[in-house]
Amino acid sequence: MSVKGTLIPIGGNEDKGNGENERYTLEYIQNGILSRVVRESGGIEAIIIVIPTASSIPVEVSENYLEAFSKLDCKNVFVMDIRSREDAEKPEFVELMQKANCVMFTGGDQSKNVKYIGGTVLDKIIKDKYENEAFVIAGTSAGAMCMSEEMITGGGVQEAFTKGAVNMGRGMSYIPNFIIDSHFIKRGRFGRLAEAMAKFPMKVGIGLAEDTGLIIKNGNNCEVIGSGMVILFDPRRLIHNNRDVVPEGAPMSITNLKVHILANGDKLDIKEKQVFISPIHLEMTDVETL
């Protein structure tokens, strides 16, 4: 499906790595990711909506974002504190979203976004604007993970690549061909995204490191932003995948899972299965081989 809007999933940036210090984190402004969100939305006059539904501390998180956008000289930033499906149907929220240039989902529990917003009038407006306008949907951590059609809802890393280690559910379905995981490097989530690939081998897995994101245009063309890495899993040409035949809790095996490690400025075309390395990185490689 061709869309006119832009998705910006971001990998999260919680200092302690356990989600408990969310109230102390002012995400992405230091390394420019939040600034890029503003530029993609049309600049400092853009109407930006912050939705802290996923967060367990929505007031504190909202205040952090208001402060961050203020430092970037943004003039029209609003918070929609949605804690029920009834909230997502409020006329004042509906009217404001119809005027918005960008919506940003905060971190927390991605299932809350689906529970309280998915399928509501507000959700339908967001999808319509994303499909038909130069509208930006940004999200950090849980706000990034909920963007996909098939969404990771949980799963520990101790079980690694064993059947049942990852929990899946339906996401907000803003993008159908990705499965997104966040805090990917710091929290060691290689195994659970790999199992998601075994379960949904026609999707592409995106593992976002902290302080790292993607600019996704037309639902397909991607550019890496931020200071970390994006781990790309492409399972579409698997030779062997035994997930369907092993019992729950058993180790699995797959072969020919392609993995790409990308950094700032690198680009990828999902449909054409092409990766484009930034000229900056090529120049650095040339220097290293001399």
Image (spheres, rainbow, N blue to C red):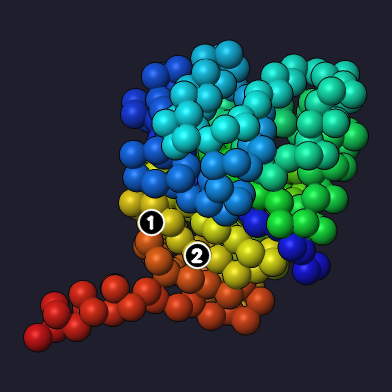
In the structure shown, which secondary structural element does the residue marked by tag 2 occupy?
A: strand
Q: Is residue 108 visible?
A: yes
Q: Give the residue number, with chain letter if any, for mark 1.
A: 229
Residue nearer the viewer, 270 or 64: 64
Q: Is residue 160 visible?
A: no
- Rendered location of residue 135, percent (x, y): 71, 51
Q: Is residue 247 found left or right of 11 in the rendered image?
A: right
Image quarter for residue 199? bottom right
Q: Give the residue number, with chain letter if any, for mark 2.
A: 223
- Rendered location of residue 23, percent (x, y): 45, 17
- Image position of 261 with respect to 135: above or below: below
Q: CA distance from mark 2 to mark 1?
A: 12 Å
- Image position of 159 with respect to 243: above or below: above
- Mark 2 or mark 1, earlier in chain: 2
- What residue is shown at x 82% (from left), y 19% (from top)? 87
Which of discs 2 and 1 lies nearer the camera? The answer is: 2
Mark 2, Cα crowd under 10 Å, few <14 / some 14-19 / many 20+, is many
Q: Is residue 104 found left or right of 225 in the rendered image?
A: right
- What residue is shown at x 46% (from left), y 24% (from top)? 67
Q: Residue furthest bottom?
A: 290
- Image position of 27 with respect to 101: above or below: above
Q: Is residue 227 found left or right of 54 in the rendered image?
A: left
The amino acid pointed to by label 1 is Met
Location of the N terminus (image quadrant): bottom right
- What residue is shown at x 74% (from left), y 17% (from top)? 83
Image quarter for residue 220? bottom right
- Rendered location of residue 80, percent (x, y): 71, 23
Location of the C terminus (image quadrant): bottom left
Task: State if disc 1 and disc 2 touch (CB < 8 Å).
Answer: no
The amino acid pointed to by label 2 is Glu
